[in-house]
Amino acid sequence: MKYIILCAAMMWSVVAAPASASAQTPKGEAPTEHQKRAQERQAKTEAYERSIDSIVVARRYAFIPSTFWMEPAGDPRTIRNPMFRIDVREKDVDVCIPYFRGVVPPYAIAVINYTVTPDAYFAEQTDHGWKITFSSSLYSANMYNFEFTVYKKTGEMELKLTTDIFNPVTYSGSIMELR
């Protein structure tokens, strides 16, 4: 499914590129109302992307999950509880998210609810946004690895949470600035 969406986005960018080039105003002519609105939307989009970059670099953001599922082929579950989120700050991370525990079905849904100091926090810029990784024991004998992918054009954020004892759990949601 992600592959289909990616292909559609790539085709849209190829189709939209000539249209945006022809929408530019020749020298000496005033831009049309359509061109003004298109330029305003483009400026807002660029400002939004810069704001995503800024909050990731400053390490003051929240991941707001909306769905989660167990890999490799679990059914997506919708998250409605507004208290479930991960707040990333400069020195610590507040984790409060649902999690599938178990090795065989039926899996139990538990809540991970800790404030931790992350081990080996890395944020690297990619073509589509950011890849952020860190790990924590979550006060247990097992290491939990957090791998975030941030798409700065859309504000979408994904988390893949892995550990040695359970199957990976993937979350999809959005990024938000912490104030």
Image (spheres, grey):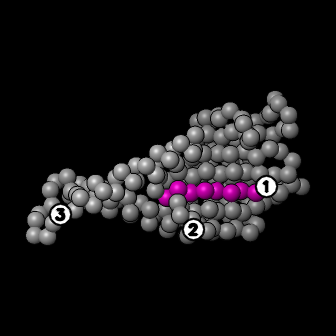
Does the segment drawn in magenta span residue 154? no
On screen, residue 76 versus residue 108, left or right, reads: left
Looking at the image, do the residues carrying marks 3 and 1 touch, with CB atoms under 8 Å apart? no
Choose mark 3 or mark 2, whichever is in front. Answer: 3
Q: Which residue is mark 2?
A: 125
Q: Which of 96/7 is in front?
A: 7
Q: Which residue is mark 3?
A: 25
What's the CA distance linking mark 3 and mark 2? 34 Å
125 vs 64: above or below: below
- The circle drawn on residue 144 is 1
| Magenta stretch prevailing secondary structure | strand
User: Under tag 2, what secondary structure?
Assistant: strand
**Residue sitting at 49 percent across and 68 percent down?**
54
On screen, residue 76 versus residue 156, left or right, reads: right
**Residue sitting at 64 percent across and 45 percent down?**
171
Q: Amino acid at mark 1?
A: Tyr
Q: Which of 42/143 is in front?
A: 42
Q: Which of 133/23 is in front?
A: 23
Q: Earlier in the sequence, mark 3 or mark 2?
A: 3
**Which region of the structure is painted magenta?**
145-152
| Image coords of residue 29 (percent x, y) | 10, 65
Q: Residues within 10 Å of mark 2 (few under 14, many from 20)?
A: some
Pick out the residue farthest to the top: 106
Q: Earlier in the sequence, mark 2 or mark 1?
A: 2
| Image coords of residue 150 (percent x, y) | 56, 57
Q: Amino acid at mark 3?
A: Thr
Q: Which of 94/17 is in front?
A: 17
